[in-house]
Image (tube, rainbow, N blue to C red):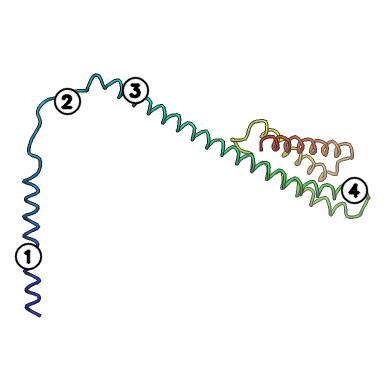
Amino acid sequence: MVIGALVRERLRIGALAVGGVATAAMVIVGCSTVTEGAGSADRAEAPVYRASVSASLEESAASSSARESERQASITKEAIHDSCETLSSSSVDAITAVNAYVDAFNQSAGDVGAKARPAIDALNHSADAVARSVSDPLAPELRDSLNAWVDAARSVATAIEGNYGPEEFNAAISRLNDTKTSALNLCDALY
C-alpha cells in the first residue's frame, strides 16, 4: 500500500508540474503586438450602416407596438367575457327568483313573504357580481349598460323590500328588463 500511495503522489506532483508549464506557455504565446493608429469609419459604408440601424429600430418598434395591441385586445376580450358571463348567469337566477315572487303575489299566496327574501337576495347578488366585474378595459357604452343593470336590480330589490305598489313595481321591472336586454345585446355584439 505504501508503494501505491507513493506512486500516486508522484503522479499528482508530475501533473501539477506539467499543468504549470502549460499555463506559462499560454501566457508567453499570447498576443504581443499592439497596432498603432486611430480608428475611423468607412465613409462610404456609414450611410448603409445608419439605414440598417434605423430600419432595425423601426421594425423593433412596430413589432413591439403590434405585441402591445394584441395584449390590450386580449385583456379587453377577457374583461368583456367576464362581465357578460357574470351578467348572463346571475341575471337568470335573479329573474327566476323575481318571477317566483310575482307568481306568489299574483296568486295572493300566503308565501309571498317567503318568496320576497330570495328575490331580494338574488337581485342584490347579481348587482354585486356585475358591479365587481366592470373594469377599465370595457368600452364605456358596455360599462354604462352594465352599471344600469346594477342600478335596476337594486331598484327592484328595494321595491320588493319596500312592498311598493304595482305601478312603481312594474316600472322597476320594466327598467330591469330593458337594461338586461340592452346589456346582453351589447355583449353579443362585442363577442
Q: Secondary structure at mark 2?
A: loop
Label 1 neighbour load within 10 Å: few <14, some 14-19, many 20+: few
- The spot of residue 22 in percent (x, y) is 8, 54
SS of the residue at dot 1?
A: helix
Residue receiving disc 1: 13
* Residue type (three-letter) at the residue carrying disc 1: Ile
Q: Amino acid at mark 2?
A: Gly
Residue 136: give x, y in percent of width and height: 59, 35
Residue sitting at the far bottom: 1
Residue at which label 4 appears = 105
Q: Residue at x 78, y 44 (%)?
A: 157
Residue 69 in the figure: left or right of residue 105: left
Task: Give the mark toward the camera: 1 or 4.
Answer: 1
Q: Which residue is mark 3?
A: 51
Q: Which is more toward the observer, 79 or 39?
A: 39
Instruction: Check if mark 2's residue and mark 4's residue have beta carbons within 8 Å.
Output: no
- Judging depth in this view, the residue of 132 and 32 nearest the camera is 32
Residue 39, which numbered label? 2
Residue positioned 9% across, 62% down in the render = 15
Residue 118 or residue 19, whichever sits in front:
19
N-terminal label among 1 and 4: 1
Q: What residue lies at 80% left-to-right and 41% top-to-bottom? A: 156
